[in-house]
Image: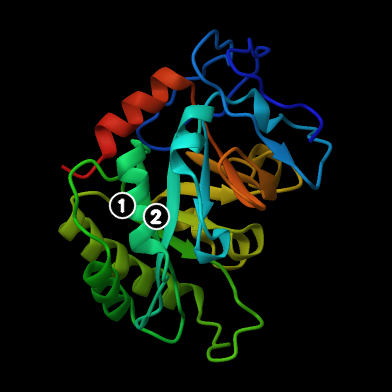
């Protein structure tokens, strides 16, 4: 993207989508003045016909071991406001960088959560137990996240369950984590999985991937809290590309969401 957010810039007014769940359901303008705003870029620019991600005030990243070393203090100083860190996958895989990133983001003062990549060849209960075994129940952490998407190239599991099975097993996974962490998990998903699995019927708060247009266009009518708008972004503190995300509301709404959803 050619437009780069500047430190202490005044952002043009934009209509924001309503926050899913705790954003209060109100709409806010992105007329932010002062403070620290992330200097973000995208190596694969798009034409955003239904709303530009940089009109949103609050941005964050999602990371896994592929990001390597990260200067989280620099990222925080540049305005990165949250991080989703890959923690687990299936019932037996843990990301080798999770613990490092978990401790580093805490030290840098960046609100963060661990996300689980859901595996359709394991039960929801098994995967919930694996997540709990690897992700601390820590005061101040954001709610857990479950990543739901098809993996057509998987070498170990190409099983494609029915909508009913997906809803049942994911529901079990989410209920177990909600009971343990005190917060219902946020659901990350992609356009194709959302449609084919009928996720609209799943009671959840959403983090939506939409790299070609605004979620209001790609997920019409769906309320959301987080928007992953690029997988080829750049941000201070990162040596290579990183996924970039926007929060649906303004900074006041973000603080309200954090205060109401952190693990206590």
Quadrant holding the N terminus: top right
Which residue is located at x 65 percent, y 17 percent? 14
Circle 1/circle 2 CB separation < 8 Å: yes
Numbered tag placed on residue 101 in the rendering: 2
State which quadrant residue 165 falls in: bottom left
Question: Which residue is more in the foreground, 101 or 158?
Answer: 101
Q: Specify the label residue 103 is tagged with.
A: 1
**Where residue 192 sits in the image (x, y, percent)?**
66, 63
Position of residue 78 relative to residue 159, above or below, is: above
Residue 47 placed where, x, y %? 84, 37
Dividing the image into 4 quarters, which one contains the C terminus?
Answer: top left
Q: Is residue 216 left or right of residue 188?
A: right
Q: In the depicted view, which residue is nearer to us: 198 or 33? A: 33
Is residue 24 visible in this depiction of the protein? no
Q: Residue furthest bottom?
A: 156
Residue 51 has which mark?
none
Q: Is residue 205 left or right of residue 128?
A: right
Location of residue 180 in the rendering, given as x and y in whole percent from the top left corner: 16, 60
Q: Indicate the secondary structure of the residue bearing disc 1.
A: helix
């Amino acid at each position: 993207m050619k437009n780069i957010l500047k430190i202490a810039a005044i952002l043009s007014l934009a209509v924001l989508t309503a926050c899913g769940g705790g954003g209060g359901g109100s709409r806010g303008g992105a007329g932010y003045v002062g403070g620290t705003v992330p200097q973000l870029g995208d190596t694969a620019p798009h034409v955003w016909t239904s709303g530009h991600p940089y009109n949103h005030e609050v941005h964050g990243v999602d990371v896994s071991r592929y990001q390597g070393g990260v200067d989280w203090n620099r990222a925080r100083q540049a305005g990165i406001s949250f991080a989703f860190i890959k923690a687990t996958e299936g019932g037996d895989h843990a990301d080798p960088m999770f613990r490092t990133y978990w401790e580093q983001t805490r030290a840098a003062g960046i609100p963060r959560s661990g996300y689980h990549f859901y595996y359709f060849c394991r039960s929801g209960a098994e995967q919930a137990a694996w997540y709990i075994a690897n992700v601390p129940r820590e005061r101040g952490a954001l709610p857990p996240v479950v990543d739901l998407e098809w993996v057509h190239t998987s070498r170990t599991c190409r099983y494609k369950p029915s909508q009913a099975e997906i809803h049942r097993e994911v529901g079990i996974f989410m209920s177990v984590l909600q009971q343990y962490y005190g917060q219902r998990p946020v659901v990350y998903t992609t356009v194709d999985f959302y449609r084919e699995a009928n996720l609209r019927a799943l009671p959840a708060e959403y983090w939506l991937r939409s790299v070609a247009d605004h979620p209001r266009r790609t997920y019409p009518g769906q309320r959301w809290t987080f928007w992953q708008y690029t997988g080829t972004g750049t941000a201070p503190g990162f040596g290579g590309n990183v996924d970039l995300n926007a929060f649906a509301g303004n900074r006041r709404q973000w603080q309200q969401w954090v205060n109401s959803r952190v693990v206590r």
